Amino acid sequence: MKLSHLKVYLAACTLVSLIAIPAFSQNTGNAPAQEAQAPMPITDVAPQAKEIAIYGEVQAVDASANTLSVQYYDYDSDSEKTAAIVINPDTKLENASAIGDVKKGDWVDVTYIVKDGKNMAKVVTVEKEETPAPDEASSQAAVPANVPPEQ
């Protein structure tokens, strides 16, 4: 008896599977048929240049040529490199109003693209040294390092 129940159960499962699989694989009718879709028009879009970001120390500033020479560490090649960065009217300068405000020894964060073989800056951020507020500087200077704080 048990073997006949097993055969009936397997036959029922097979029948349900044969009915259910085609039902789930049918097109619902909400989307147009693949053949009826019009092909997408191909537009001529120029590929965008890849933006590159570096952080380094300014080695030289040439205000007449609108260029910066920035020494940075290239993690891909595991070496120090120097990049000549061109500043143009579209370049956004942060913490500097003009290229003349950038000095040798300043640390900069530069985002640029390579265009016509030149490194054209998009954004140049000059890092400012943080100076303690006057209250903090005077309170820190007034307490010698070897005196424990009052309790």
Image (tube, rainbow, N blue to C red):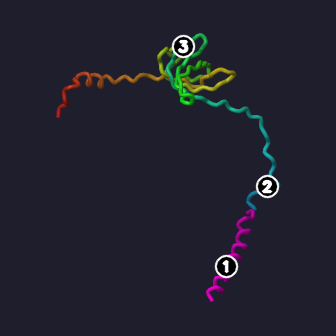
In the image, farthest residue toward the left: 151
Residue 126 in percent (x, y) is at 49, 22
In the image, farthest residue toward the top: 64
Q: Which residues are magenta?
A: 1-28
Marks 1, 3: nearer the viewer: 1
SS at mark 3 in the image:
strand
Residue 97 in percent (x, y) is at 52, 18
N-term-proximal mark, 1 vs 3? 1
Q: Residues within 10 Å of mark 3 (few under 14, many from 20)?
A: many
Q: Residue under label 2, please give it.
A: 34
Residue 132 in percent (x, y) is at 34, 24
Q: Residue under label 1, please give it.
A: 10
User: At 23% from the left edge and 25% from the top edge, which residue is drawn?
Assistant: 145
Judge by depth and name the residue closer to the eye, 151 or 70: 70
Rendered image quadrant of residue 52: top right
Marks 3 and 2, how far apart at CA: 60 Å
Does 99 appear in magenta?
A: no
User: At 29% from the left edge and 24% from the top edge, which residue is drawn?
Assistant: 135
Q: Residue under label 3, please give it.
A: 61
Marks 2, 1: nearer the viewer: 1
Q: Taking 11 as reference, is 79 above or below it?
A: above
SS at mark 2 in the image:
helix
Q: Are marks 2 and 1 in contact (CB under 8 Å)?
A: no
Residue 103 in percent (x, y) is at 49, 14
Q: Amino acid at mark 3?
A: Val
SS at mark 1 in the image:
helix
Q: Amino acid at mark 2?
A: Gln
Does 22 appear in magenta?
A: yes
Q: Amino acid at mark 1?
A: Leu
Marks 3, 2: nearer the viewer: 3
